[in-house]
Image (tube, rainbow, N blue to C red):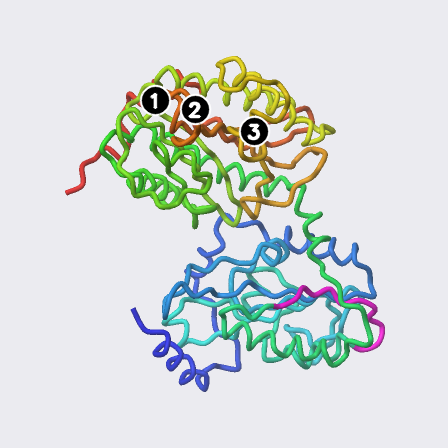
Amino acid sequence: MLTRSLRSFVVVCSLALTLAEAQPMPSSYLEYDVDRLPPSVHRARRDSLMTLLGERSVVILAAGPVRVRNHDVDYQYRQDDNFWYLTGFPEPNAVLVLVPRGIQVADPADSTRRITVREVLFVEPRNPQRERWEGRRYGPEGAMSLRGFAYALSHDRMGAVLARVLMEGVEAVYCPTMRDEADEARAEVLRPVESMLERVRTRFERRDPTPTIQRMRAVKSSEEVALLRKATTISAVAHAEAMKSVQPGMREYELQAIYEYVYRRMGAEYAGYPCIVGAGENAVVLHYSTNRREIRSGDLVLADCGAEYRGYSSDITRTYPANGRFSRPQRAIYDIVLAANQAAIAAIKPGVAWRDVTAISDRTLEAGLVRIGLVKQTDGREFRKFVWHGLGHAVGLNVHDVGVDTLRANVVFTVEPGIYIAEDMEGIPPEYRSIGVRIEDVVLVTSGGNEVLSKGAPNEPAAIEALMRRSGIGNVPVE
């Protein structure tokens, strides 16, 4: 792998080779856009945002930064949620400027004509030498022709355009605080933006557009639901393969590998979050991530794993016995959690407050723990020593996405009750120690109720045990 300094040298030396005229877009580049939301969806969102903020506003949003993993190795790039929601543009070092009242620019098809546009996307210019090292870039022409932007320019033109945009008539500039973070290229792009805003800050009020964009994101469109359905289908297949594959003597990371293989094999670009695979005592660590322990007969395995597909993340948790059969104490705890999961899902429909769904789950968990004698009082407090987190959360562009207080059609939530009994808890019968159970499903609120999107991964004990009698892709020996 090239060092960062060598890559920087190549980029600097090749700047003089950047062509002023548009570069032809390779036909293979079109594959980059397969199964993404169409540009018309993102354009409609930008139009809606401008309508909400009014004609006297300007919106300036920056792409997410490139993050350094260590030394001269970067993390795989992932776009900022809000920028992705409005643009569908996958590259770093881009800036979106929305001008509801419009701005006159040269017609891309005929430079002698002037046209009025309400959006300008500033992007990295295409550079053949750099693309040999880092892959294809859209450039301004590709941003317009392939991603549907009304107007796009290379980001070296941004200062001049912003100077015109921020002239008289602007009452509010909606621009989040732009942190440089660890990305030098992003800092270089954003420096003229912050400099320009500082020079003219007495003319307008600076506001954060994030709350408005998040309200837009809470209710999913039909296109977003389709992508969440696909992400959840991939995740459910991965859970089923892991259940079939697990056996005592494996390491937790071997199960993690099965999940991540299925994600990639089925077209997901990322895991939605680091894979949690905890066996035995590790199952009671909510965000366990070491994934190194040997899985032993008699362990429960708690796997909280979800794929991200085209920017949309799923989130499924399944708990299953390493040897294929629940013990009596494991089954007792599992049945309580499953009852809470099912009772909560049954209550989900438009108009229901999320806190009321949570209350149903809590009552079910408490009653079950009282029934088996681990909790003595039905006081709404004692059971909390075994129940450590809330019922669930919205999913979407972020695995913990923008939610709502009262459920509406086309919001997507997880339902994930859990009971956790650590090995060092006092006063607990030995047979219940080191048992952690969480059952998490992805639920779409529909106009008439709900739909469980994650049903492809079984959660009934009998169905889990039956599935685990079959062989999975992880049972193939590795030399």
Q: Position of residue 463 (x, y in %)?
A: 39, 18
Residue 412: quadrant of the picture: top right
Q: Which mark is residue 467?
A: 1
Quick one: label 2 or label 3, which is nearer the N terminus?
Answer: 3
Quick one: label 1 or label 3, which is nearer the N terminus?
Answer: 3
- Whether label 2 touches label 3, CB < 8 Å: no
Above or below, 144 relative to 435:
below
- For label 3, the crowd category at 10 Å Cα-Cα, with few meaning under 14, some 14 to 19 and many 20 or more, is some
Give the farthest residue toward the front: 427
Q: Amino acid at mark 2?
A: Pro
Q: Amino acid at mark 1?
A: Leu
Q: Mark 3 highlights which residue? A: 384
Secondary structure beneath dot 1 equals helix
Q: Position of residue 90 (x, y in %)?
A: 52, 60
Q: In the image, which residues are magenta?
A: 167-178
Badge count:
3
Pick whichever, 159 or 294, lies toward us: 294
Secondary structure beneath dot 2 equals loop
Residue 198: quadrant of the picture: bottom right
Q: Amino acid at mark 3?
A: Arg
Distance between the alpha carbons at the discs numbered 2 and 3: 27 Å
Q: Which mark is residue 458?
A: 2
